[in-house]
Image: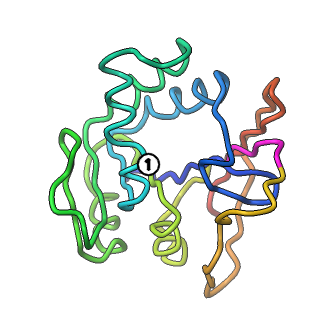
């Protein structure tokens, strides 16, 4: 069975607003390595539109400011397929992208049963729909040494039916002060 992995950058106070965070080579390398075992991205519309066409364009033109950023873009672009849950998107911009307006839980259950590599989930709205169903197997949090004081928080508006117990299986401290935390669902 394929694993469903949720990965996100956030501040110490839980802010996930991309305008409050900045990437660095260590983070790009971390996600580049993570994406090597992914063959399907699953995004909500907002996250999809943040990622595509930006990263495929960087991969095509090698227009990143560092080699690590370009390698990240290549790894992002190399993922075989993208699935976008949206009620408002008409057509996808990216290659091998399918837009779905059905129930995310049912679709993810089916995808987990298919052959393939891991599935990466991106987007806070999508997380809120999948977390209570127990469909996320692994969580990767990159915590930045920033207190944003404002912006969208990781679990804003999410009311869990029961507490979700996770097991820390790996942590990495970067020179920048960022910490990568990898948790498995128990």
- In this view, 117 is above or below 183: above
Q: Say which residue appears at 19% left-offset and 54% top-offset.
A: 98
Tell me if 55 is positioned left or right of 159 in this view: left
Q: Position of residue 156 (x, y in %)?
A: 65, 74
- The span shown in magenta is 141-146
On whether residue 130 falls in the magenta region, the answer is: no
Q: Say which residue appears at 67% left-offset and 24% top-offset.
A: 26
User: Is most of the magenta stretch helix, strand or loop?
Assistant: strand
In this view of the protein, which residue sits in the foreground, 150 or 43?
150
In this view of the protein, which residue sits in the foreground, 9 or 135?
9
Per the image, label 1 sits on a secondary structure element best described as strand
Tell me if 92 is positioned left or right of 151 in this view: left
As drawn, the residue found furthest toward the bottom would be 161
Q: Say which residue appears at 53% left-offset and 64% top-offset.
A: 124
- In this view, 154 is above or below 34: below
Q: Dot 1, how many residues are within 10 Å of its Cα: few (below 14), some (14-19), or many (20+)?
A: many
In this view of the protein, which residue sits in the foreground, 104 or 92?
92
On whether residue 143 falls in the magenta region, the answer is: yes
User: According to the image, what is the colour scheme of the structure?
Assistant: rainbow
Q: Say which residue appears at 36% left-offset and 73% top-offset.
A: 105
The quarter of the displayed image where residue 165 is located: bottom right
Q: Quadrant of the C terminus?
A: bottom right
Total labels: the figure holds 1
- In this view, 3 is above or below 132: above
Q: Position of residue 83 (x, y in %)?
A: 28, 54
Q: Which residue is mark 1?
A: 120
Q: Position of residue 149 (x, y in %)?
A: 81, 61
Tell me if 175 is positioned left or right of 84 in this view: right
Q: Position of residue 178 (x, y in %)?
A: 78, 36
The quarter of the displayed image where residue 84 is located: bottom left
The quarter of the displayed image where residue 117 is located: top left
């Amino acid at each position: 069975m394929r694993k469903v992995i949720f990965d996100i950058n956030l501040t110490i106070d839980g802010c996930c607003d991309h305008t409050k965070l900045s990437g660095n080579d260590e983070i790009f390398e971390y996600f580049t390595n993570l994406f090597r075992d992914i063959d399907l991205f699953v995004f909500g519309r907002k996250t999809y539109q943040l990622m595509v066409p930006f990263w495929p364009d960087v991969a095509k033109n090698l227009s990143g400011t560092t080699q690590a950023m370009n390698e990240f873009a290549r790894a992002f672009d190399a993922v075989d397929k993208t699935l976008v849950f949206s009620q408002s998107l008409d057509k996808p911009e990216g290659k091998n992208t399918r837009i779905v307006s059905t129930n995310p839980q049912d679709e993810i259950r089916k995808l987990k049963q298919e052959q393939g590599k891991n599935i990466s989930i991106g987007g806070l709205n999508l997380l809120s729909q999948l977390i209570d169903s127990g469909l996320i197997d692994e969580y990767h949090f990159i915590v930045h040494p920033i207190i944003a004081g404002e912006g969208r928080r990781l679990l804003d508006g999410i009311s869990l039916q029961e507490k979700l117990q996770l097991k820390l299986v790996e942590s990495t401290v970067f020179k920048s002060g960022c910490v990568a935390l990898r948790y498995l669902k128990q």
